[in-house]
Image (cartoon, rainbow, N blue to C red):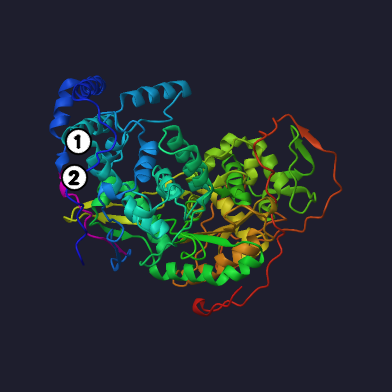
Amino acid sequence: MSRPPKRPPLRPLAQPGPKEPSQLRKLFLRGLVILLIIGMALGVGGGIALAVLYNRLPDVRQLEKFTLPQANEIYTRSGRLLTRISSQGRYDPIPLEQIPKHMQDAITSAEDRRFWEHTGVDLLGLARAAFVNIRKGGTVGGASTLTQQLIKNLFLTSERTAKRKIAEALLAIQLESKYSKPQILEMYLNLVFLGHNVYGVEAASQVYFGKSVRQVTIAEAAMLAGIIRSPEYLSPYHRMEGAKKVQAIVLNQMAKDQRITEKQKEEALKQPIHLAGLRTSYPHPYFLDYVLYSLREKVGEGLFRRGGWKVYTTIDPEAQAYAERVLREQAPRIMRYGAKQAALVSLDPRTGFIHAMVGGVDYSKSQFNRAFQAQRQVGSTFKPFVYLSAFEQGKDLKSTLQDGPVSFGGYRPRNWDRRYHGQVNLLQALTMSMNIPTVKLANELGMDRVIDVARRAGVSSEIANDLTSALGSSEMNLLELTAAYGSFANGGMRVQPTAIAKVVDVEGNVLFDYYPPQQRVFPLAAVSQLNIALQNVVNKGTGTGANLGRPAAGKTGTTDQSYDTWFVGYVPQLVTGVWAGNDTPSATRGGGGSVCAPVWRQYMRFATRGLPAEGFEVVQPESSASPSSSDASASPSPTPTGPAIEISEIPPQTPPPVESTPSPAPTPEVTEPPAEETPTPIEETPVEQPSEEPML
């Protein structure tokens, strides 16, 4: 392996840029900054702590010898080397005088407008940020300079503490006392992270635009500068619309700073952006992109850049390869429903280890990882949280509700079939994914209680405290929803999902050895009731397209106009979630049962081939001697060959008068409640060996 290129030695530049402050003014400003820092230090331990901290700071002159190190080695969970991912080819240092002036100006306008005036810490910026934060009642912005960003990324961790901020400020002042402004700007432009494992504006220009930064236009320079704050999220390969928005912000600021003219700004806003096309040389790129993202989050940007890590992942290479194959093969069928994209996540609910993750149907065409980067409405896959909340409060599968017209302060939920079914029990309501009984149940329990159940399961995304959330109007990503269902599969025990099991540094020290602990979040009796109902969804309800011929549970989800379709299901040893839809939300013609369930079934047949067919543990609730009734029957311990739980036919009822409740109406911002798909099973195919499975 060739050694990474070294950055050019620091040297005086022919054109140092804007005039720097006078020496007297610089000394005065530096003194003010140091006094400010001392004042901050008094709040976290006094002047002695400041002196100790200062003596422990690294020497900023290390920057002169900085190089990107050796590649990271990525291993499978069994310890087999999967690939080496190197920073070489994505770091290409370039002298400042060869970087166009408009590229330099775009960066300073976007990240540090007073770069040429301050002495490492921007007092005016700090004061402005403090004023805004006080006015907004919280921390909404900071005032890190380019110098501070450079220090934080190369020497410090990403922790948000007063100690780290003080160290960052002291090092920034030290750096500015040893190097000139042009030298600092050169270092920053060559080392700033710009997504896709790319460092520096030269490498980024090559990756995004297929040309040297020497040739970038004002429009392209503004886009690169705009994505610095969140390069993975705002990458034009992922979100061109978002990248264009921040580009416009940078161009407006450049014009305001008089670094470009109004005419140049208008021309740049109209210029189309042509991307070069992103390529990768490593296997399973969606999964490994998530591994690199997780590693950066765990060790911090500075340590991540040093590289040389041995990363032991949780990937099951065979399952991952088959998941990629399934989405590739199923893509034509999915497209017939109007959905162009799909994603899949599969993990062990007992350990939290992610076995497979596929973020799209074709990585070469789109590197956006929809498995964890896309927030979409979850539809009826949210309903299990409502019913689990009811089971926790003493209700059981025989508990009944009236399915009929109802109004909650003007909000009138409706069933997917536009019919009313009279008195139904909870088993029937969840099996057939009825909306009205679900909303009635959520109203009776209170959405605070329902949201608490989702939080305990591991959902971290915002959930509106509104009755439409009971039908899945809030947004989540596939990874968190799938992991939350893992607590159902694991008998009420929650385990945090992870793609990394262990990390070893270049010296052989184990930095991270993770075996997620199990945490009891739901009583087994309540989860047992839910698992019976969700098995019935697969056997007799809206999810029959996912039937494996062995005990399995799951739930379909379809949002209004089928913008998003879902199926999340599980056996005791494995939980898998599938999403399908379009990146720009648009109507499709399918539902979770017809679009996603067949994808789930094809993958799960392969992934469970070596797992024994186990039933879910059944514990009777204290309030009921048995979960069965004339409508539902269940053996004490479901067996792989046992009959499906039966539900009786529910005759349509003549609509009774609208039942009115005093509950407040939902907030106007919430969308129309999602509708569930008709529970018509797809054409059944014989169970075959996974390697020979036909298209469904």
Does the magenta-highlighted stretch encompass residue 71? yes
- Is 308 or 132 nearer to us in this picture? 132
Question: Is residue 248 among the parts visible in the rendering?
Answer: yes
Mark 1: secondary structure: helix
Residue identifier under label 2: 63
The amino acid beneath tag 1 is Leu
For image coordinates 68% across by 72% down, the residue present is: 683
Q: Are marks 2 and 1 in contact (CB under 8 Å)?
A: yes
For image coordinates 50% across by 68% down, the residue present is: 613
For image coordinates 38% across by 63% down, the residue present is: 315
Q: Position of residue 212 (x, y in %)?
A: 35, 57
Residue identifier under label 1: 175
Q: Quadrant of residue 542?
A: bottom right
Does the magenta-highlighted stretch encompass residue 468? no
Q: Position of residue 404 (x, y in %)?
A: 79, 44
Q: Position of residue 444 (x, y in %)?
A: 66, 36
The amino acid beneath tag 2 is Leu
Q: Is residue 284 above or below residue 41?
A: below
- Is 211 or 61 nearer to us in this picture? 211
Q: Which residues are magenta?
A: 62-75
